[in-house]
Amino acid sequence: MFEFKLADVGEGMHEAEILRWLVEPGAAVKVDQPIVEIQTDKAVVELPSPVAGKVQKINTAVGQMAHVGDVLIVFDTAVSAVGSVKAGEAAPSPIPAVSRPPVATGGSLDPSKSKPAQAVVPSFDALPPTVLSSQPVVPNLAVAQMSAAGEANGVVIRKPGSVRAAPAVRKRAVELGVDLALVTPGSSDGRVLLKDVEEYAANGGANSPAGADEGLLTLIQAKPGWNDPAMVAHTAVEAPAVSNGNGNGHGPGTLTARPNLAPGGEERKPLAGLRRRIAERMELSARTIPQVTTFDEADATELVALRGRLQEASLKRGVKMTYLPLIVKAVVQTLKSFPMFNASLDEASREVVYKHYYHIGLATATPDGLLVPVVRDADRLSLVALAGEINRLGEGGRKRSLKAFELSGSTFTLSNVGSFGGYTGTAIINPPEAAILAVGRVQERAVVRGGLVVARPILPLSLSFDHRLIDGAEAGYFVTALKELLENPSLMMLEAV
Amino acid sequence: MVVGDVTTAASTVVLGGGPGGYVAAIRAAQLGQSVTLINEGPTGGTCLNSGCIPLKALVSAARRYRSLQDESLAPLGISLGSKPTFDWSQMQSWKGSVVERLSSGVTRLLAGHKIEMLPGNGWFLNDHELRIEGEYGSHRYAFEKLILATGAVALPLPDLPFDAQVLTPQQALVLTSLPSQMSIVGDDYIALELSTLFQSLGVSVTLLTAADRLLPVVDPAAARLVQAGLRKLGLTIVTGAHSFKKTDDTLAYSVGSATKTAPLPVIVSNGVRPNLAKLNLDAANLKLEGDRLTLDAGLQTVNPNILMAGDCTGGVALATTAIRQAKLAAASAGGQRVAYAPQTLPQVIHTTPEVAYVGLSSEGAKQAGYEIVSGRFPLAANGRALTLVSENGVALTVAEAGSGILLGMTLVGPQAGDLIMEAALAIEMGATLTDLAEILHPHPGLPEMVLESVENALSQAIHILP
């Protein structure tokens, strides 16, 4: 027996949400076979099995939070996955194959090359709505088709413990890109019903289990014309079509409010996945950090010119140069002069932690929500390397392909609030950091130079800081120093590494 | 480019007119696509013209002829004045009329859906154009979506190439005269149905199979009944046969280390190979993996504009699956998200008695890791079967212990191939033994064998003792 415990897969991770199990009880598992998908702070990670064996028990259900050290799954290692099928003796096809060459339609046609765990795209909303990519979105049931046992004739054989869903439900699941294994069965006998799949899809990946009054009974409501009293007696319990909203019980007419009941009403969707994590982080920031914001503007004339000069040479190295690497360089140099802005408050010990490394978080919008990829040791990267790393992290963030360590451990965060419209804005501190800088959009604005009104490209700056560690005066000095570097970027050469 | 080689732009092009092709064409048209169907030969492909339909027609005729000589008629007071006879060439022309009727019916359906039909064959010029050559000359066709449904070709045995004495199943169905004896090599439904066909018509048939028993994938209790039925027809069955070779005028083969001979001609049913060789796949950047192309669940090749359906996928070579894939490929070509993911494949073999099966056998279910309960009901205990003088059969049920979810069913007996659909529906719906037992079944009727087999699995069958 082997107990698989949740280990720290990223810096300082202490809990993770179970997104999806890739194995089920009874399944044979090979070493390094991916077994579970978890979502840590902000990354989705697939964990491989360290042992070969048979899945005995899954302890943590999908959607639950697991803590480091929790036993997620128990393996029976007495039977090795490889040994359970005798050499040279293929598992007999449950349904006879009529054509001689073993066949597997759908997915990889070579069963030995097919990877069941990868046949399902983890998150359906990451896909364009109508395109089936080379990674097909298929319901859980179809996965078996591409796995070793079901390949005999391209027909999926129900596996022990697999999802029960009627063909029309499975069809809808494919259309909506829903993995049936993730849908909570709405029927008390474990069937996934059409409404479960649609509710799951509408809610962006969650549905609520039905009460005992619902489920199959909704399918067999007594209908006019069913005049056989014996039949009516069996089917007279109609699931109520509307809720009275009091949510006090499960008797007829007292069901809890369900989504989509009346047009023009309201809908409730659970806070799930990344959105839930974002909400938790925001609450933590707003609840624990007394934060205030100071504003300034930098004349970006020089910065615009410098970036223009660097762009061509940078492109030759295959890297697109944006303002962001230049701003990060300026921020890092300023942080070196103002260590408190790169520090954090250890709430437990009431100590200030000064960090002698500069990991810069970059708030990034992704289709799923806000992610903060981290440029590690930004002070030690050349400008072009920094630009490359920023581009890589931005792309990885949008694709949700970043690892946990690439999304944690920042010491100071930069938010480019200007990139989506709006002139500027305030940012909220990314705990446990001491400050966050929001940069607005570079725009030509009328400014006074030598008594004359002239047009200059202006970069708005807004610095939110933890008032427990930093006072307004220091924040002002910080912004002024940063502004000087941004307005005269050649000064950065003095401290360039 | 040849002068005058004008490219015709087409929306959805289907290559192949069998059940994979014509069904894809019709479904694509139903979904609003503008469809061009390119097909060489008569509409309906192998299945309709030279495979399933001709085989079923001839097997039905042969079984009907054989039933006239059955000793079971006498107790009913029926006697035929003289020994019944048959005319093979008339039987062939009747078969031809069935095929002709179906084929022209399909052509009318295609025309009714405004599908442009182009006789000829085609191959890739690049990943978005085909060269079509046919009776109207050579054309260059640019497609937006292409559904390949080019079928498959019979696969010979290693040392037994097809020739005038070594026939494919399709060739056997158009024999102009019947030999007095023949051999049939294979253990699939085709070999068994051909054996039934020719033996019923008086040909002395030797059936040679490589496996150590007939129908190795079917529950042994059912396979024994089929084997007994075939033996009763007079068929010689040899199991464990291998190393087939043609000598001067006989078929040599080995059983164990002993070398034996069987008569010629021999029909070889050794499965099929996808018919992709002449498509110039390289031009479209499609690469064969072995003898097939990689497909995703939506039946797309690595090029999302090129899809496949039917035997050419290298999947199970049955029109049953081709028809389903064709509909999905058409929907996939139309931008819908689909997945080819049936849970069960109902299969039928038109032997005497008929056998049909769906889902898992007892053995298969145990191999898949299930704890099972099983049920069994002999046809001899079914009232309707006795009235049909067909008591040779059985219904076998396999379900998951505890949940009672139906996992599989095997039926032997008259109309087994029609009765099996109750079980197929139940499996696809995730129905339990109790679900099935709660349903009214007509009495007296053959469907009651399904019901009582299910009830036997619940230890509640009425008409047999536990």
Image: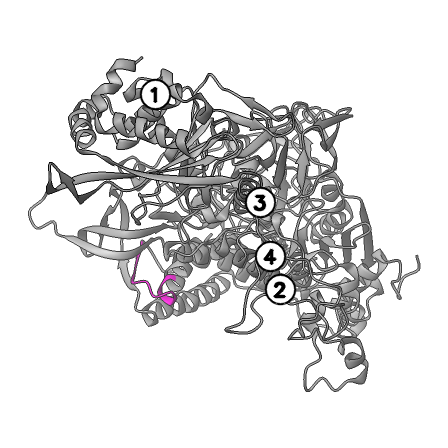
Let me know if residue B267 appears in the view: no
Which residue has dot 1 on it? A333
**Residue at label 4?**
B201
- Splitting the image into 4 quarters, where does residue A393 fall? top left
Q: Quadrant of the N terminus of chain B?
A: top left
Q: Nearer the viewer, residue A188 or B300?
A: A188
Q: Amino acid at mark 3?
A: Val
Instruction: Find disc 3 in the rendering and name its residue.
Output: A98
Q: What colouring method underlies this structural image?
A: one colour
Distance (Cα) linking label 3 and label 4: 25 Å
* Residue at the image point whose x is 32% and y is 51% from the top: B146
Please, which chain is the residue tagged with disc 3 on? A
The subunit carrying tag 1 is A
In the picture of the structure, the residue carrying the numbered disc 2 is B65
Residue B50 x %, y %: 44, 55
Residue B416 shows which numbered tag? Answer: none
- Residue A433 part of the magenta segment: no
Circles 4 and 2 on the same chain: yes
